[in-house]
């Protein structure tokens, strides 16, 4: 769905080493690693959970993020795997995207079908996914990295990049990304499940301020 290809170890040994290290700290099997050919800094995780999962990062993420930020982004996705968020996220996104694509079969009725199926898909997404999963993934990512600042800085970078870099994908994929990469208008506005970045960054900074970064 996002045109990702598997990333060989020989092509990105340091990235694979980082994923392996973070996965070991989280107590899960190392996820398969994929590359998304997109200039927008993005990442996602899919799969069944700790025993079988895949992690993907965009070429823009690898190019734009310093090591500490990239560690934070990868740790956030591994936290989703650890918490078993990925199984339900993947299922919900596939279901929602299928409903959106189903509207395309309507020919002249496409707009009417989209008007009906779009809200249904969005309702399914919001019913099954909670913004709390992002806060919990952020907390575990901070623990895995032993600092919340890398992820906090990456989230700010992502938000700034979204204002400059165009991004096209099914709005139903919104729950998969580490933040909402879509302009919140039209159909995309229906699928927003992420808390505001400012709130997430504030919570992460507070972990450092109070020295409450939890143990991994």
Image: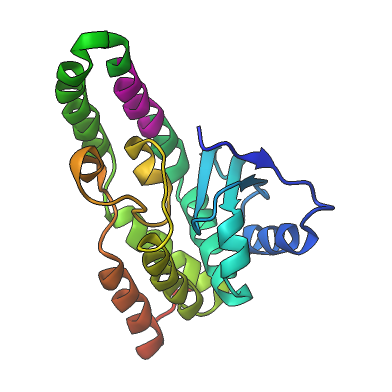
Name the residue: 46% across, 80% down.
Answer: 149
Give the quarter of the image for residue 157. bottom left
- Residue 26 visible here: no
Q: Give the range drawn in magenta.
A: 92-102
Foreground: 20 or 157? Answer: 157
Q: Would you say the magenta stretch is mainly helix, strand or loop?
A: helix
The residue positioned 58% from the left and 76% from the top of the image is 68
Up the image or down, 101 lies above or below 27; here it is above
Task: Pinpoint residue 176: horizontal percent, then vertical percent.
Answer: 42, 45
Q: In which quarter of the image is residue 187?
A: top left
Residue 94 position, x and y percent, is 41, 28
Can residue 97 be found in the magenta stretch? yes
Residue 25 locus on image (x, y percent): 63, 64
Is 151 a magenta residue? no
Q: In this view, does 25 lie above or below 52?
A: below
Number of residue marks? 0
Q: Residue at x 58, y 48 (%)?
A: 56
**Of the pair 54 and 171, the residue shown nearer to us:** 171
Write the residue at 25% across / 48% down: 192
Which residue ends up furthest to the right in the rendered image?
10
Report x, y in % for residue 199: 26, 71
Give the left or right position of residue 4, taking residue 161 as reference.
Answer: right
For the question of whether residue 188 can be seen, the reply is yes
64 relative to 172, above or below: below
Q: Quadrant of residue 158?
A: bottom left
């Amino acid at each position: 769905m996002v045109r990702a290809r598997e990333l060989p170890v020989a092509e990105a040994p340091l990235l694979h080493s980082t994923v392996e290290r973070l996965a070991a700290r989280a107590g899960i099997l190392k996820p398969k690693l994929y590359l998304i050919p997109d200039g927008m800094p993005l990442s996602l995780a899919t799969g069944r959970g700790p025993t079988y999962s895949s992690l993907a990062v965009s070429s823009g993420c690898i190019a734009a993020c310093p090591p500490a930020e990239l560690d934070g982004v990868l740790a956030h996705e591994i936290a989703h795997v650890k918490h078993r968020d990925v199984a339900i996220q993947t299922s919900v996104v596939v279901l929602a995207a299928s409903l959106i694509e189903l509207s395309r079969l309507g020919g002249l009725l496409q707009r009417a079908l989209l008007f009906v199926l779009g809200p249904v898909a969005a309702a399914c997404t919001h019913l099954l996914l909670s913004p709390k999963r992002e806060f919990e993934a952020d907390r575990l990512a901070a623990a895995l990295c032993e600092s919340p600042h890398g992820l906090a800085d990456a989230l700010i970078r992502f938000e700034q990049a979204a204002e400059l870099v165009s991004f096209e994908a099914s709005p139903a994929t919104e729950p998969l990304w580490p933040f909402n990469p879509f302009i919140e208008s039209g159909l995309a506005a229906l699928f927003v499940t992420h808390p505001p970045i400012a709130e997430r960054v504030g919570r992460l900074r507070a972990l450092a301020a109070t020295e409450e970064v939890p143990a991994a």
